[in-house]
């Protein structure tokens, strides 16, 4: 079964073609990072306009690279939740139009769940793409971490899962972006902090981990504030000093040490929760998903702390992409009926627990 996947939930416009939920035929991504870097973060109106400009060319290119026609496409999957409402609308309207025009079944899927299903792609027509050697097996523990989400989810099977815990405030990717801004590092913050941390000492500054009632919940707001106060002390100013003026007071060594110390503590927070869940639930496999899954320190700590080895999805499938949507769409198609085209609407704040195949 060949699925066309469409992703436009934030600032990447992507389309991909995936066969049987595991074989990648194409994956085209148009990133808006350079556009939003000027503003230090994603501007929703700008993102939506950019999606409108490129959505059709991206879909055409994905089909051309996969060497398929509309006669070959069995169904369309589209990210309908969660995300920026304007961005989601562009992808959903494109998918609805194409499904109606070409008489294809349409499957709306959850963006965060899609990130997890990037780990099910094990084969590709691109020979140099380093993919997992086999698909995850159930029960599966998934750590989903990105700019908007930090969740631990236990899967018993496709569509059968429960949320163990999630962030109570900032997502870890959001914390990376905000700390990067304090340090005078460019957007997006995750890659910038990782690069700076390579020259820093992760133990130069002692930063706190949040103490919460559940071992599977996360909080990064306090860590972010602790970094701010530590920088202010380091450069000799009080708490009233504006954070946007702090970068000019830091030297390169301090900046690298703060980046390394923050990254180490943020990642340790994620890894400790994952390790506790592994010990309690003994999953057959563990996967990490989302943009922060590309973080090398997260991969290093997980590999050192968990008893079983983890096979990681390639970096290109960790950030937002259509391949993960197409892969998830295939598994939806095995379980649920397609949604009537005129009933597919965007759900910007929808929880994974309320997705189409859980209704």
Image: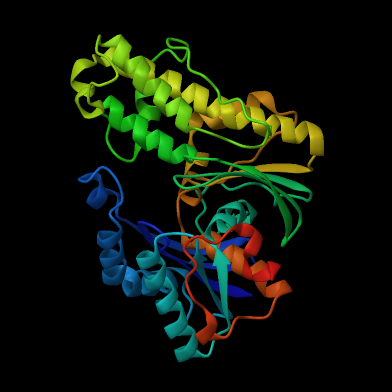
x, y (%) of residue 267? 53, 28
**How many labels, in total?**
0
Depth check: 131 or 328 in front?
328
**Position of residue 42 in the picture relative to residue 68 (left or right):** left
Residue visible at 54% across and 31% down in the picture: 298
Depth check: 288 or 206 in front?
206
Depth check: 155 or 235 in front?
235
Residue visible at 57% across and 25% down in the picture: 268
Locate residue 58: give its quadrant.
Answer: bottom left
x, y (%) of residue 195? 36, 27
The answer to whether residue 199 shows anywhere in this view is no
Examine the rendered structure and indicate whether residue 60 appears above or below residue 214: below
Depth check: 316 or 47 in front?
47
Farthest front residue in view: 240
Residue visible at 73% across and 35% down in the picture: 277
Q: How is the image coloured?
A: rainbow
x, y (%) of residue 95? 45, 78
Examine the rendered structure and indicate whether residue 12 appears above or below residue 98: above
The answer to whether residue 183 shows anywhere in this view is yes
**Position of residue 4 in the picture relative to residue 272 (left or right):** left
Examine the rendered structure and indicate whether residue 357 appears above or below residue 127: below
The N terminus appears in which quarter of the rendering? bottom right
**Position of residue 20 in the picture relative to residue 124 (left or right):** right
Examine the rendered structure and indicate whether residue 94 appears above or below residue 252: below
x, y (%) of residue 47? 29, 60
The C terminus appears in which quarter of the rendering? bottom right
């Amino acid at each position: 079964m060949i699925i066309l996947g469409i992703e436009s939930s934030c600032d990447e416009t992507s389309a991909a073609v995936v066969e049987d939920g595991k074989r990648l035929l194409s994956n085209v991504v148009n990133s808006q990072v350079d556009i939003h870097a000027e503003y230090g973060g994603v501007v929703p109106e700008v993102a939506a306009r950019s999606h409108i400009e490129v959505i059709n060319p991206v879909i055409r290119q994905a089909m051309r690279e996969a060497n398929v026609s509309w006669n070959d496409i069995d169904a369309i999957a589209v990210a309908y939740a969660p995300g920026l409402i304007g961005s989601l609308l562009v992808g959903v309207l494109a998918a609805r139009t194409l499904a109606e025009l070409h008489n294809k079944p349409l499957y709306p899927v959850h963006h965060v769940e899609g990130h997890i299903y990037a780990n099910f792609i094990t084969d590709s027509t691109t020979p140099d793409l380093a993919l997992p050697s086999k698909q995850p097996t159930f029960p599966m523990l998934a750590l989903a971490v990105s700019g908007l989400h930090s969740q631990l989810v236990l899967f018993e099977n496709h569509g059968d899962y429960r949320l163990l815990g999630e962030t109570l405030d900032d997502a870890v990717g959001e914390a990376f972006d905000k700390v990067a801004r304090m340090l005078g590092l460019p957007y997006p913050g995750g890659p910038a902090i990782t690069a700076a941390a390579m020259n820093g000492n992760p133990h130069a500054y002692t930063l706190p981990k949040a103490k919460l009632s559940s071992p599977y919940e996360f909080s990064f707001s306090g860590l972010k504030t602790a970094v701010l106060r530590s920088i202010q002390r380091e450069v000799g100013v009080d708490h009233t000093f504006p954070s946007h003026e702090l970068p000019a007071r830091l030297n390169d060594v301090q900046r690298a040490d703060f980046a390394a110390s923050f990254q180490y503590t943020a990642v340790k927070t994620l890894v400790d929760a994952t390790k506790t869940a592994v010990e309690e639930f003994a999953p057959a496999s563990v996967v990490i998903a989302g943009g922060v899954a590309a973080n090398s320190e997260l991969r290093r700590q997980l590999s050192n702390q968990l008893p079983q080895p983890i096979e990681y999805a390639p970096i290109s499938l960790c950030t937002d992409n259509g391949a993960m949507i197409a892969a998830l769409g295939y598994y939806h198609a095995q379980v649920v009926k397609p949604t009537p085209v005129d009933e597919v609407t965007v759900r910007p704040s929808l929880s994974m627990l309320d997705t189409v195949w859980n209704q």
